[in-house]
Amino acid sequence: MSSRASVLESPKVSDDADRDDRDLEAELASPVAGRFGIPVDAICVGCGQTHVKRASLQEMDQLPQADLAALEVTDCTSFKHVCYPCQGATWWNPVAVLTGLLESEQERERERGE
């Protein structure tokens, strides 16, 4: 198993954005990431592409009240989500819990008063 799959993301968004030279914030803001759930970096089992997706804790076999700071990606199970290249719902394997993106998103919501 790679260290990438076993390490929680740091709270710094810049570290998240450096992953494979991808803009993870832009991926999270995209409609293809989904609207609800925590952000995870995941691999589609159909085509092998990696994207930021949103999944609920329950979808990944976690309790709804789970402590996100202590959540290990290795404890999360595969979840179903839409894959546009595969043209349908497929299974996705989480490779990282993107806590930095989640914290950044929550901070922006607090600043807007949401």
Image (cartoon, rainbow, N blue to C red):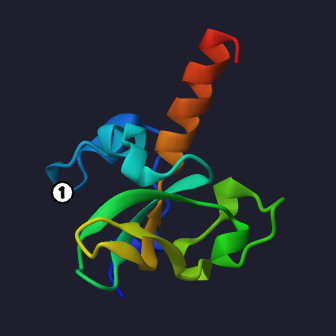
Image position, residue 57 (x, y; %): 69, 65
Image position, residue 82 (x, y; %): 42, 67
Q: Is residue 55 above or below residue 106?
A: below
Identified at 66% across, 72% down, the residue is: 59
> Quick one: which residue is furthest to the left in this view?
21
Image quarter of residue 79: bottom right
Image position, residue 41 (x, y; %): 40, 62
Q: For mark 1, what is the residue?
A: 20
> Quick one: which residue is furthest to the top in this view?
112
Residue kind at label 1, given as amino acid type: Asp
Number of other residues with Cα within 10 Å of mark 1, as a class: few under 14, some 14 to 19, many 20 or more = few
Report the label total. Answer: 1
Left or right side of 7 for 38: right
Which of the two residues, 64 or 8, is positioned nearer the viewer here?
64
Left or right side of 64 for 110: left
Q: In which quadrant will I find the C terminus? A: top right
Q: In which quadrant will I find the N terminus? A: bottom left
Q: Is residue 22 above or below residue 7?
A: above
Identified at 54% across, 32% down, the residue is: 105
Image position, residue 21 (x, y; %): 15, 49
Image quarter of residue 91: bottom left
Identified at 32% across, 36% down, the residue is: 14
Identified at 34% across, 85% down, the residue is: 45
Which of the two residues, 37 or 107, is positioned nearer the viewer here?
37
Q: Is residue 64 above or below residue 10?
A: below
Q: Secondary structure at mark 1?
A: helix
